[in-house]
Image (cartoon, rainbow, N blue to C red):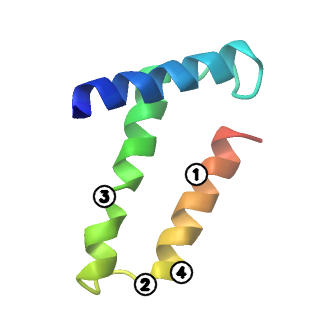
Amino acid sequence: GLVRGREQVEQLIRQAIADGHIAADRDPAVETNLLLALTGLTPLIELGVIAPADALTAIDTHLARLLP
C-alpha cells in the first residue's frame, strides 16, 4: 500500500545519500515527504489551479536542488 511505497522511496533516498548522489546533510524522511508532496500537483493541474508547465518547473527545481 501507500505506507510500503513511501518506505521504498525513503530507502531509495537513503541509498542515494550513501552513494553520494544526494548531499549527506539531507534528511531522508524530509526529502521523501517533499518528493511525495510533488505528486499532489496532479489534482491542481486537473482542476486548472496551476498550469502543467508550472508543475514541471516546480518538479525540476526541486530535483535540481536535491541532485546537484
Residue 38 shows in the view = yes
Cα distance between the residues tagged 1 and 4: 14 Å
Query: Mark 4 sits on what residue?
Result: 53
Quadrant assignment for the C terminus: top right
Q: Which element carries disc 1, helix, strand or loop?
A: helix
Cα distance between the residues tagged 4 and 2: 5 Å
Q: x%, y% of residue 51?
A: 43, 84
Q: Residue at x 69, y 28 (%)?
A: 22
Crowd class of label 1 (few under 14; some 14 to 19; many from 20; radius 10 Å): some
Crowd class of label 4 (few under 14; some 14 to 19; many from 20; radius 10 Å): few
Q: x%, y% of residue 60?
A: 62, 60
Dot 2 amino acid type: Ala
Query: Mark 1 sits on what residue?
Result: 62
Quadrant assignment for the N terminus: top left
Give the mark nearer the N terminus: 3 vs 1: 3
Query: Mark 2 sits on what residue?
Result: 51
Tag 4 and tag 3, C-beta contact below 8 Å: no
Tag 4 and tag 2, C-beta contact below 8 Å: yes
Nearer to us: label 1 or label 4 = 4
Q: Which element carries disc 4, helix, strand or loop?
A: helix
Q: Of 35 and 11, which appears nearest the observer?
A: 11
| Residue at the top extreme, as displayed | 18
Dot 4 amino acid type: Ala
Cα distance between the residues tagged 2 and 1: 17 Å
Query: Mark 3 sits on what residue?
Result: 40
Q: Is residue 21 above or below residue 45?
A: above
Cα distance between the residues tagged 4 and 3: 15 Å
Dot 3 amino acid type: Gly
